[in-house]
Image (cartoon, helix red, strand yellow):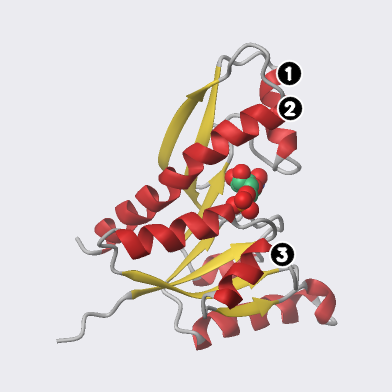
Amino acid sequence: MTIHKTRLAVFCSGNGSNFKSIFRAIAEKPLNAEIVLCVSNRSQCGAMEFASQNGIATLHITEKQFGAFDDFAAAMVACLKNAQIDIVLLAGYMRKVPDAVVAAFADKMLNIHPALLPKFGGEGMYGMFVHSAVLEAGETESGATVHFVNEEYDKGKILLQRRVPVLPGDTPESLAARVLECEHTLYPDALEKLLAMQNT
Ligand code: GAR
Protein backbone atom coordinates (compact mmCIF):
# COMPACT_ATOMS: atom_id res chain seq x y z
CA MET A 1 0.00 0.00 0.00
CA THR A 2 1.30 3.47 -0.87
CA ILE A 3 0.81 6.03 1.86
CA HIS A 4 0.34 9.52 0.44
CA LYS A 5 3.06 11.80 1.70
CA THR A 6 1.96 15.32 2.58
CA ARG A 7 3.27 17.58 -0.14
CA LEU A 8 4.94 20.74 1.11
CA ALA A 9 5.77 24.02 -0.59
CA VAL A 10 8.31 26.10 1.34
CA PHE A 11 8.45 29.85 0.68
CA CYS A 12 11.79 31.60 1.28
CA SER A 13 13.57 34.85 0.47
CA GLY A 14 17.04 34.41 1.91
CA ASN A 15 19.57 32.00 3.36
CA GLY A 16 17.03 29.27 3.79
CA SER A 17 18.46 27.83 6.99
CA ASN A 18 14.91 26.97 8.09
CA PHE A 19 14.28 25.34 4.72
CA LYS A 20 17.37 23.21 5.29
CA SER A 21 16.37 22.28 8.86
CA ILE A 22 12.92 21.15 7.67
CA PHE A 23 14.49 19.19 4.81
CA ARG A 24 16.90 17.45 7.22
CA ALA A 25 14.20 16.74 9.78
CA ILE A 26 12.11 15.02 7.11
CA ALA A 27 15.12 12.87 6.22
CA GLU A 28 15.82 11.98 9.85
CA LYS A 29 12.41 11.75 11.55
CA PRO A 30 9.44 9.62 10.63
CA LEU A 31 7.60 12.60 9.13
CA ASN A 32 5.22 11.54 6.39
CA ALA A 33 5.90 14.60 4.24
CA GLU A 34 8.12 15.79 1.43
CA ILE A 35 9.19 19.20 0.19
CA VAL A 36 8.18 19.27 -3.46
CA LEU A 37 8.47 22.98 -4.21
CA CYS A 38 10.61 25.92 -3.14
CA VAL A 39 8.91 29.25 -3.86
CA SER A 40 10.80 32.52 -3.75
CA ASN A 41 10.51 36.17 -4.74
CA ARG A 42 14.22 35.96 -5.52
CA SER A 43 15.59 33.94 -8.42
CA GLN A 44 18.82 33.35 -6.52
CA CYS A 45 19.10 32.87 -2.79
CA GLY A 46 20.39 30.20 -0.41
CA ALA A 47 17.07 28.39 -0.30
CA MET A 48 16.65 28.24 -4.10
CA GLU A 49 20.22 27.03 -4.51
CA PHE A 50 19.79 24.33 -1.87
CA ALA A 51 16.50 23.22 -3.43
CA SER A 52 18.05 22.91 -6.89
CA GLN A 53 21.00 20.96 -5.52
CA ASN A 54 18.60 18.54 -3.84
CA GLY A 55 16.30 17.92 -6.79
CA ILE A 56 13.43 20.03 -5.47
CA ALA A 57 11.48 22.08 -8.01
CA THR A 58 11.82 25.85 -7.68
CA LEU A 59 9.41 28.62 -8.54
CA HIS A 60 10.58 32.22 -8.82
CA ILE A 61 7.46 34.34 -8.74
CA THR A 62 7.02 38.05 -8.04
CA GLU A 63 4.34 40.65 -8.53
CA LYS A 64 6.55 42.42 -11.08
CA GLN A 65 6.20 39.51 -13.52
CA PHE A 66 2.47 40.26 -13.85
CA GLY A 67 0.45 43.22 -15.07
CA ALA A 68 -1.96 43.11 -12.15
CA PHE A 69 -1.72 41.93 -8.57
CA ASP A 70 -4.75 39.65 -8.96
CA ASP A 71 -3.04 37.87 -11.86
CA PHE A 72 0.04 37.34 -9.67
CA ALA A 73 -2.11 35.90 -6.87
CA ALA A 74 -4.07 33.67 -9.28
CA ALA A 75 -0.84 32.37 -10.84
CA MET A 76 0.57 31.54 -7.43
CA VAL A 77 -2.57 29.62 -6.46
CA ALA A 78 -2.50 27.79 -9.82
CA CYS A 79 1.16 26.79 -9.41
CA LEU A 80 0.53 25.45 -5.91
CA LYS A 81 -2.56 23.54 -7.03
CA ASN A 82 -0.77 22.14 -10.11
CA ALA A 83 1.99 20.86 -7.84
CA GLN A 84 -0.72 19.29 -5.64
CA ILE A 85 0.55 21.09 -2.57
CA ASP A 86 -1.12 20.13 0.71
CA ILE A 87 0.69 22.48 3.11
CA VAL A 88 2.57 25.76 2.63
CA LEU A 89 5.38 26.70 5.02
CA LEU A 90 6.66 30.28 5.05
CA ALA A 91 10.29 30.13 6.14
CA GLY A 92 11.93 33.53 5.96
CA TYR A 93 9.60 34.71 3.17
CA MET A 94 9.80 38.49 3.32
CA ARG A 95 6.67 39.29 1.31
CA LYS A 96 3.03 39.30 2.28
CA VAL A 97 1.28 36.31 0.75
CA PRO A 98 -1.72 37.40 -1.37
CA ASP A 99 -5.08 36.94 0.36
CA ALA A 100 -6.26 34.61 -2.44
CA VAL A 101 -3.39 32.23 -1.65
CA VAL A 102 -4.05 32.42 2.08
CA ALA A 103 -7.72 31.63 1.43
CA ALA A 104 -6.80 28.67 -0.80
CA PHE A 105 -4.68 27.22 2.01
CA ALA A 106 -6.77 28.12 5.07
CA ASP A 107 -5.45 26.19 8.10
CA LYS A 108 -2.77 24.73 5.82
CA MET A 109 -0.25 27.54 5.84
CA LEU A 110 2.30 28.20 8.59
CA ASN A 111 4.81 30.97 9.18
CA ILE A 112 7.79 31.21 11.51
CA HIS A 113 8.41 34.51 13.25
CA PRO A 114 11.59 35.27 15.21
CA ALA A 115 9.92 36.56 18.40
CA LEU A 116 7.30 35.64 20.96
CA LEU A 117 4.11 36.71 19.22
CA PRO A 118 1.84 38.57 19.78
CA LYS A 119 4.73 40.82 20.83
CA PHE A 120 7.05 42.21 18.14
CA GLY A 121 4.95 41.24 15.15
CA GLY A 122 3.17 43.12 12.37
CA GLU A 123 4.14 45.01 9.26
CA GLY A 124 7.81 46.00 9.17
CA MET A 125 8.70 43.54 11.93
CA TYR A 126 10.98 41.07 10.25
CA GLY A 127 14.57 39.87 10.47
CA MET A 128 16.95 42.11 12.37
CA PHE A 129 14.23 44.77 13.04
CA VAL A 130 12.57 42.29 15.38
CA HIS A 131 15.71 41.61 17.42
CA SER A 132 16.59 45.31 17.67
CA ALA A 133 13.07 46.05 18.94
CA VAL A 134 13.30 43.25 21.53
CA LEU A 135 16.59 44.64 22.86
CA GLU A 136 15.34 48.23 22.84
CA ALA A 137 12.31 47.17 24.87
CA GLY A 138 14.62 45.67 27.52
CA GLU A 139 13.07 42.20 27.27
CA THR A 140 14.73 39.42 29.28
CA GLU A 141 13.56 36.71 26.92
CA SER A 142 12.72 36.26 23.28
CA GLY A 143 12.07 33.22 21.12
CA ALA A 144 10.30 32.03 18.03
CA THR A 145 6.70 31.37 17.08
CA VAL A 146 5.12 29.16 14.44
CA HIS A 147 1.59 30.29 13.64
CA PHE A 148 -1.12 29.75 11.07
CA VAL A 149 -1.23 32.42 8.40
CA ASN A 150 -4.29 34.59 7.97
CA GLU A 151 -4.84 37.86 6.10
CA GLU A 152 -3.13 39.96 8.80
CA TYR A 153 0.62 40.07 9.41
CA ASP A 154 1.64 37.69 12.23
CA LYS A 155 -1.90 37.50 13.64
CA GLY A 156 -2.92 33.88 12.93
CA LYS A 157 -3.44 31.28 15.65
CA ILE A 158 -0.22 30.20 17.37
CA LEU A 159 0.71 26.55 16.84
CA LEU A 160 4.00 26.35 18.77
CA GLN A 161 6.33 28.74 20.55
CA ARG A 162 9.74 28.36 22.19
CA ARG A 163 11.70 30.75 24.41
CA VAL A 164 15.34 31.75 24.57
CA PRO A 165 16.97 34.12 27.06
CA VAL A 166 18.16 37.60 26.19
CA LEU A 167 21.68 37.77 27.65
CA PRO A 168 23.57 40.78 28.99
CA GLY A 169 25.60 42.35 26.19
CA ASP A 170 23.43 40.86 23.44
CA THR A 171 23.50 42.61 20.08
CA PRO A 172 20.72 42.16 17.49
CA GLU A 173 23.09 39.75 15.71
CA SER A 174 23.89 37.59 18.76
CA LEU A 175 20.20 37.41 19.70
CA ALA A 176 19.26 36.59 16.09
CA ALA A 177 21.72 33.69 16.09
CA ARG A 178 20.26 32.26 19.34
CA VAL A 179 16.70 32.61 18.08
CA LEU A 180 17.58 31.07 14.70
CA GLU A 181 19.09 28.01 16.38
CA CYS A 182 15.84 27.63 18.30
CA GLU A 183 13.83 27.99 15.06
CA HIS A 184 15.69 25.04 13.54
CA THR A 185 14.08 22.58 15.96
CA LEU A 186 10.84 24.52 16.45
CA TYR A 187 9.70 24.48 12.82
CA PRO A 188 10.14 20.72 12.30
CA ASP A 189 8.33 20.13 15.62
CA ALA A 190 5.50 22.43 14.55
CA LEU A 191 5.23 20.59 11.23
CA GLU A 192 5.07 17.29 13.10
CA LYS A 193 2.28 18.71 15.27
CA LEU A 194 0.30 19.94 12.25
CA LEU A 195 0.65 16.58 10.49
CA ALA A 196 -0.56 14.81 13.63
CA MET A 197 -3.54 17.21 13.87
CA GLN A 198 -4.47 16.46 10.26
CA ASN A 199 -4.49 12.73 10.88
CA THR A 200 -6.93 12.94 13.77
C1 GAR B 1 14.27 33.66 10.33
O1 GAR B 1 14.77 34.17 11.54
C2 GAR B 1 12.77 33.87 10.29
O2 GAR B 1 12.14 33.71 11.52
C3 GAR B 1 12.69 35.30 9.84
O3 GAR B 1 13.70 35.42 8.85
C4 GAR B 1 14.75 34.50 9.14
C5 GAR B 1 15.01 33.67 7.92
O4 GAR B 1 16.16 32.89 8.06
N1 GAR B 1 11.39 35.61 9.33
C6 GAR B 1 10.81 36.79 9.50
O5 GAR B 1 11.33 37.73 10.05
C7 GAR B 1 9.40 36.89 8.90
N2 GAR B 1 8.66 37.92 9.53
P1 GAR B 1 16.47 31.69 7.07
O6 GAR B 1 16.34 32.22 5.65
O7 GAR B 1 17.90 31.33 7.39
O8 GAR B 1 15.50 30.57 7.34
Mark 1: few/some/many CA within 10 Å (<14, 14-19, 20+): few
The answer to whether residue 120 of the structure is visible from this angle is no
Q: Who's the residue at 42% across and 44% down the image?
A: 186
* Snapshot quadrant of residue 194: bottom left
User: Which mark lies nearer to you, 2 or 3?
Assistant: 3
Of labels 3 and 1, earlier in sequence is 3
How far across and down, in percent of the image, does residue 115 sit? Answer: 57, 34
Q: Is residue 171 visible?
A: yes
Residue with the mark numbered 1: 136
* Residue 2, quarter of the rendered image: bottom left
Q: Amino acid at mark 2?
A: Ser
Which residue is the site of mark 3? Answer: 45
The answer to whether mark 3 and mark 1 are in CB contact below 8 A is no
103 or 43: which is nearer to us? Answer: 43
- Viewer-nearest of discs 3 and 1: 3
In the image, is the residue at mark 1 within 8 Å of ligand 1 by its beta carbon? Answer: no
Spatial CA distance of label 2 from label 1 is 6 Å
Q: Amino acid at mark 1?
A: Glu
Tag 3: residue type? Cys
Report if the CB atoms under discs 2 and 1 are less than 8 Å apart: yes
How far across and how far down the image is residue 168, in percent?
A: 63, 11
Identify which residue is drawn at 79% across, 73% down: 63
Question: Which residue is found at the position 43% from the left and 33% from the top?
Answer: 162
Residue 21 spot, x, y in % from top left: 47, 54
The local secondary structure at tag 3 comes to loop
Q: Mark 2 or mark 3: which comes first in sequence? A: 3
The residue singled out by tag 2 in the image is 132
